[in-house]
């Protein structure tokens, strides 16, 4: 959902939709183009690139802020603000040269200083940015909470158009990562009052600039005439309409009050193709869905917890749920990443722990009971504004029937409320989770969620072996060698199950007949800048 995010991470399965239904569709622009209306969700935080790690804010931040590279629909990278990004022989010192004449939306130049200041701010523990993890590889980064580290040793200005980045270890895919929003430059005005800037980001570098944010209703962006890059808008602007339910967004799409819907609601899986007359797509996407059972919960720590997580995982018939609930728009998970990401494997050691085996599940549950007898009800928390109830109910019933325990869903009114309880560690039950790729690499699905210091490690999972293997992958001489280490880390995860993998979410999107050139990327996000309207 970034799964971006927690769905960004989505945030997650139904793109984390919330807030009140917006008003009618877009108006024609002065040059005959149009404002494109798209579905969205109320951002959890102000629109600061280094502090936005969920899909509601992430989709908006991506359009407001350019990065050194951007991602094409197939996941390949192309330079956006960078002229070149060159490593030394060890992939440890990277020299970044900016394009000439790149500008912010107010016409001021984008220089090396704008990157260095933004990255230093995002990395400084004192600023407690949710995406600070993305700067961990840079020399001088500190994980000490509250420590004031104003400058990273590894950032060096060469001239206004050039800077060097020295990493703590060789990192083969560093250039690929630089398309994530945390690496965006920021204008000087942002540092006067970062929170105020996030609520009203009037000076930006991306293809669109900010017009207004009507909380729980809509966020309006207009084309940035000073943007000169590969994402040059073919329309006049975007209106992100914020819905309480996906069903309401889909109804608006059918009624002509919404132009593009990036996630078809579950209830319409059987009818959307005919109802939209071919204006839809169902294709693999880089979205992983799961639920997390924190080790701090009663009965889920140590060996007992590992046995219970494996038992619960084996008690779930993923094929049945993806077939009956999702009607072929999901694929049962065999790992913690996505089949559209280079390096994915569906035959890792431990894959049997995410395969349906009710007899083995009962056996493992009994072993856990021998350590400490189970009592109470197993609950899975979810946001009821995101279309999750059907699958949560189905999975809960499978756990109940196959393990002989009480199990049920625990609804939260909104994604924001659920995320608040998760991030503040107030939640006392299992909870749904999802991840939408920030960049097209295996590391992005693993390091943020399962390393000890991961920025989106909601379950507070920690295993030194996983940390070591992911670090070794980061330091590998090539992306292929890195993927080998990442998959070894996954084999540890398949044993520990810090999250219970469920399925990969397809990109199932639809659009009105009045719009053209709708393309859904590898990460399930529309290429908003390409959309045109009659």
Image (tube, helix red, strand yellow):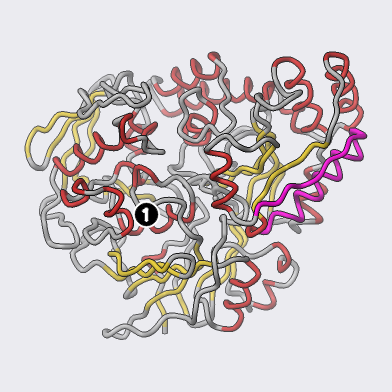
Give the secondary structure at mark 1.
helix
Going by the picture, which residue comes out furthest to the front? 426
Q: Considering only vertical position in the picture, is 48 above or below 172?
A: below
Write the start and end of the magenta stretch as one range.
Answer: 387-412
On-image quarter of the C terminus: bottom left
Q: How many marks?
A: 1
Q: Residue at x 50, y 63 (%)?
A: 40
Whether residue 404 is in magenta: the answer is yes
Asked whether, in this view, residue 375 is left or right of residue 480, the answer is right
Going by the picture, which residue comes out furthest to the left? 159
* Residue 318, quarter of the rendered image: top right
Q: Position of residue 69 (x, y in %)?
A: 30, 46
Q: Considering only vertical position in the picture, is 23 above or below 222?
A: below
State the residue position of label 1: 62
Which residue is more in the foreground, 464 or 333?
Answer: 464
Asked whether, in this view, residue 259 is left or right of residue 534, the answer is right
Q: Residue at x 48, y 22 (%)?
A: 470
Q: Residue at x 33, y 72 (%)?
A: 234
Asked whether, in this view, residue 281 is left or right of residue 90, the answer is right
* Residue 65, quarter of the rendered image: bottom left
- Mark 1 crowdedness (10 Å alpha carbons): few <14, some 14-19, many ≥20: many
Q: Considering only vertical position in the picture, is 400 above or below 22?
A: above
Whether residue 392 is in magenta: the answer is yes
Q: Residue at x 73, y 25 (%)?
A: 298
Q: Position of residue 283 (x, y in %)?
A: 60, 57
Q: Position of residue 532 (x, y in %)?
A: 40, 76
Q: Position of residue 462 (x, y in %)?
A: 56, 20
* Residue 346, quarter of the rendered image: top right
């Amino acid at each position: 959902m970034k799964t971006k995010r927690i769905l960004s991470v989505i945030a997650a399965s139904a793109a984390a939709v919330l807030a009140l239904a917006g008003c009618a569709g877009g108006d024609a622009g002065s040059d005959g183009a149009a404002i494109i209306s798209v579905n969205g969700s109320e951002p959890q935080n102000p629109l600061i690139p280094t502090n936005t790690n969920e899909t509601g804010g992430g989709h908006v931040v991506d359009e407001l802020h350019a990065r050194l590279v951007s991602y094409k629909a197939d996941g390949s990278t192309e330079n956006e603000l960078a002229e070149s990004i060159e490593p030394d022989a060890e992939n440890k010192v990277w020299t970044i040269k900016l394009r000439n004449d790149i500008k912010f939306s107010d016409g001021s130049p984008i220089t090396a200083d704008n990157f260095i200041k933004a990255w230093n701010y995002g990395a400084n523990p004192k600023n407690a940015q949710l995406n600070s993890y993305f700067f961990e590889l840079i020399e001088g980064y500190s994980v000490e909470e509250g420590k004031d580290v104003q400058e990273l040793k590894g950032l060096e200005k060469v001239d206004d158009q050039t800077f060097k980045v020295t990493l703590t270890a060789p990192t083969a895919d560093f250039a690929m990562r630089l398309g994530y929003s945390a690496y965006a430059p920021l204008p000087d005005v942002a540092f006067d009052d970062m929170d105020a800037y996030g609520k009203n980001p009037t000076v930006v570098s991306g293809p669109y600039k900010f017009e207004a944010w009507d909380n729980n209703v809509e966020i309006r962006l207009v084309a940035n005439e000073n943007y000169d890059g590969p994402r040059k808008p073919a329309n006049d602007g975007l209106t992100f309409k914020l819905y309480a339910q996906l069903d309401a967004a889909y109804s608006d799409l059918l009624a002509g009050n919404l132009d593009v819907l990036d996630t078809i609601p579950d209830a319409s899986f059987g009818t959307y193709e005919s109802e939209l007359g071919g204006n839809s797509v169902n294709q693999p996407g880089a979205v992983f869905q799961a639920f997390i059972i924190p080790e701090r919960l009663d009965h889920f720590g140590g060996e007992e917890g590992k046995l219970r997580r494996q038992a619960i995982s084996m008690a779930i018939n993923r094929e049945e749920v993806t077939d009956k609930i999702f009607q072929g728009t999901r694929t049962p998970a065999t790992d913690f990443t996505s089949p559209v990401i280079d390096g994915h494997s569906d035959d890792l050691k431990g894959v049997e722990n995410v395969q349906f085996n009710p007899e083995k599940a009962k056996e493992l549950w009994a072993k856990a009971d021998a350590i400490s007898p189970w009592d109470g009800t197993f609950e899975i928390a979810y946001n009821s504004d995101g279309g999750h109830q059907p699958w949560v109910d189905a999975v809960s019933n499978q756990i109940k029937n196959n393990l002989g325990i009480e199990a049920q869903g625990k609804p939260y009114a909104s994604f924001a409320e659920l995320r608040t309880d998760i991030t503040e560690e107030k939640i006392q039950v299992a909870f749904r989770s999802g991840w939408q790729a920030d960049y097209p690499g295996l590391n992005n699905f693993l390091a943020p969620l399962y390393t000890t210091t991961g920025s989106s490690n909601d379950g507070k999972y920690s295993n030194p072996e996983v940390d070591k293997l992911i670090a070794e992958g980061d330091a590998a001489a090539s992306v292929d060698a890195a993927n080998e280490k990442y998959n070894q880390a996954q084999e540890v995860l398949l044993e520990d199950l810090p999250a219970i993998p469920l399925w990969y979410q397809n990109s199932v999107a639809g659009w009105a007949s009045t719009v053209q050139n709708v393309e859904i990327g590898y990460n399930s996000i529309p290429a908003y800048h390409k959309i045109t309207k009659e």
